[in-house]
Image: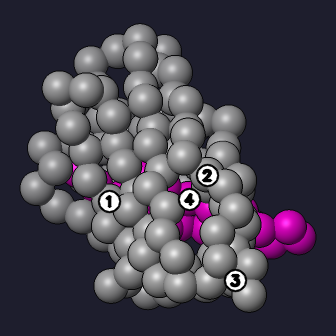
Amino acid sequence: QVQLVESGGGLVQAGGSLRLSCAASGRTFSNYDMGWFRQAPGKEREFVAAIRRSGGRTAYADSVQGRFTISRDNAKNTVYLQMNSLKPEDTAVYYCAADSGYYSNLRNRAEYDYWGQGTQVTVSS
């Protein structure tokens, strides 16, 4: 089992920045690829960003490319999502997730084994 706890959400004005953190415990963090997803009211949970277990490869949704940066610190068992130039349409609950498989399609939420409880991000216009 892996436990994931997100933090760092909040209310920010459009154009502002937030950094989300996801702390993992329970198993060897470096054995997992990590992803961030988000879910807005009335919408499906969607892919935001992902990072391979070594930290060497990342992927982003088109809607956040160039504004968000995913990173990880395997020594601290933590994955981060730096969000800049935030827009009202970024408002959602943000979830981190862990995938133990190899060569997974990290944009597919079905690939992930463990999920956090989520943290609310609200961007005002």
Q: Which residue is mark 3?
A: 88
Type of the residue with mark 1: Ile
Q: Reply above or below: 71 against 112.
A: below
Which residue is denoted by mark 1 in the rendering?
A: 70
Residue at (55% x, 40% y) in the render: 7
Mark 1 element type = strand
Q: Quadrant of residue 54?
A: top left
Q: Is residue 36 left or right of residue 29?
A: right
Badge 4 or badge 2: first in the primary sequence: 2
Q: Earlier in the sequence, mark 4 or mark 3?
A: 4
Expressed as whole percent of the image width and height from the top left, the position of residue 14 reads 62, 83
Tell me if label 4 and label 3 are in contact, CB under 8 Å: no
Check residue 125 for magenta coloring.
no
Horizontal and vertical percent for residue 97?
49, 42
Look at the image and give the residue range highlighted in magenta.
34-52
> Marks 1 and 2: which is nearer the front?
2
- Distance in Å between CA atoms under marks 4 and 3: 16 Å
Q: Residue at x 25, y 45 (%)?
A: 72
Callout in the foreground (4, 3): 3
Q: Position of residue 11 (x, y in %)?
A: 70, 62
Labelled pair 1, 2 in contact (Cβ < 8 Å): no
The answer to whether 76 appears left or right of 97 in the picture is left
* Residue found 38% across the figure and 62% down from its top: 82
Residue type (three-letter) at the residue carrying disc 2: Gly
Which label number is shown at residue 9?
2
Sooner in the amino-acid sequence: mark 1 or mark 2: 2
